[in-house]
Image (tube, rainbow, N blue to C red):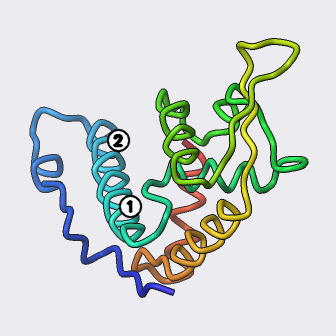
Amino acid sequence: MIPWNLNRSPAVANKALVIRSPDLTLEQKVVALLMCIAQEKKVVIERSLDGAKVQSLLQLNLLHTLSRAPEGTLTVGQLKGLMVDESPNVSRAVSKLTELGLVEKHRSPEDQRTVHVTITRAGERAHVEGDEQLDGFTIGLTKAETRQLFDLLSKL
């Protein structure tokens, strides 16, 4: 497990520009800060995956989704539909996972346009290792502050 403290991020956005901006409304500042913080945390998390077989959050999410699928298989279209965000890079990420031996692709015999993706044993191991690296995740807030933040973000 990697010790995480995302408050000491080496990838720091200049949030002070947003905070001090006289041209933005309070709501615009909140949205801008959320975007800055999300990007900072994503960079830190992806840098922590550097030594792992999985090289991005998208790849880890794809493996996670496949590991929970019936028989570990989904179509590329199904995978796209199950992603947290609408990433246009799912096909490219699947190809990279195939090169790494973490998934296998098979064309549907009924419809050659449909590609089925199946997680391999190595993919299952990489998925577990990636999840273990995320186990130490902390954002530096107390449990009460984390709950309050969660409740507020859930309203958006």
Q: Which residue is mark 1?
A: 46
Q: Look at the numbered disc 1 and give the secondary structure of its residue.
A: helix
For residue 73, which quarter of the picture? top right
For residue 94, which quarter of the picture? top right
> Earlier along the polypeptide chain: callout 1 or callout 2?
2
Q: Which residue is mark 2?
A: 31
Answer above or below: position of 138 versus 44: below
Image depth: mark 1 or mark 2 in front: 1
**Looking at numbered disc 1 in the image, what kind of residue is underneath it?**
Glu
Is residue 59 toward the left or the right of residue 16 in the image? right
Q: CA distance from mark 1 to mark 2?
A: 22 Å
What residue do we see at 48% from left, 76% from top?
Answer: 137
Please tell me the numbered disc located at residue 14.
Answer: none
For mark 2, does the 10 Å Cα neighbourhood hold few (<14), some (14 to 19), or many (20 or more) residues? Answer: few
What residue do we see at 72% from left, 26% from top?
Answer: 115
**Looking at numbered disc 2 in the image, what kind of residue is underneath it?**
Val
Is residue 131 toward the left or the right of residue 30 in the image? right
Query: Residue 114 versus residue 10: which sits nearer the camera?
Result: 114
What residue do we see at 25% from left, 71% from top?
Answer: 9
